[in-house]
Amino acid sequence: MNTLGIDNGISGALALVGELGNLVMWIPMPIQKTRKGNEVNVCAVWSWLVENNILPGNATVVIEEPGGSKSAKAASSMAGSFHALRSIFSIKDYKLVRTTPQAWQKSLLKCKAGDTKPVALTLAKSLWRAEKWLSTERCSKPHDGAIDAALIAEWARREKL
């Protein structure tokens, strides 16, 4: 069974890892503009799932719960994203697993709190050597959300969730 990891939030991503640990695909979190900023575009997420045959019964979904936001606005945005995404998977009857950043990072990254981003990038590059982690050809900085989403999926696969 495939595992879909979700780094929650508007700068997050969705990543699908196969049952043998191969990175199948990933996308930056689809977002849409609103009068107050951006929010997750749940219709685009659903379209991507259907187009790529990521349907109930062939994927376990592991979503990172909001936590540790640097501001009230960021916390509110992450909570809204989390609940919008959780609703899709609950309504459509996916197997849904919720995790905290601390749970998967402690198990998979085994590093101090301030070192998670560089350690995650190093691990992701070692697991999926061909992946560049760039959201577009013009980008030069790896997409942190994609790296985290893929590692969330890999953690869940290893834990047999």
Image: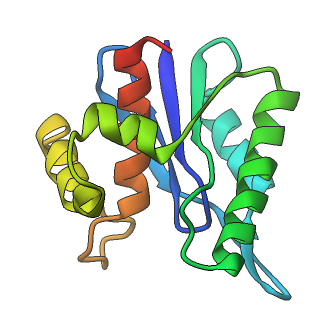
The residue under the point 40% across, 19% down is 157
The residue under the point 46% across, 46% down is 101
Report the label total: 0
- Looking at this view, name the residue that lies furthest to the bottom: 35
Is 92 situated left or right of 59 in this image?
right
Q: State the image coordinates of residue 132 (x, y, percent, origin top left).
A: 22, 57
Q: Is residue 146 above or below residue 55?
A: below
Is 149 situated left or right of 23 in this image?
right
Q: State the image coordinates of residue 18 (x, y, percent, origin top left).
A: 39, 22
In this view of the protein, can residue 33 be seen by the observer?
Answer: yes
Q: State the image coordinates of residue 85 (x, y, percent, origin top left).
A: 74, 46
Q: State the image coordinates of residue 107 (x, y, percent, origin top left).
A: 31, 31
Residue 76 occupies quadrant? bottom right
Residue 41 occupies quadrant? bottom right
Q: In this view, does 128 lie above or below 159?
A: below
- Looking at this view, name the residue that lies furthest to the front: 112
Q: Is residue 77 above or below residue 8?
A: below
Residue 159 occupies quadrant? top left
The residue under the point 39% across, 49% down is 148
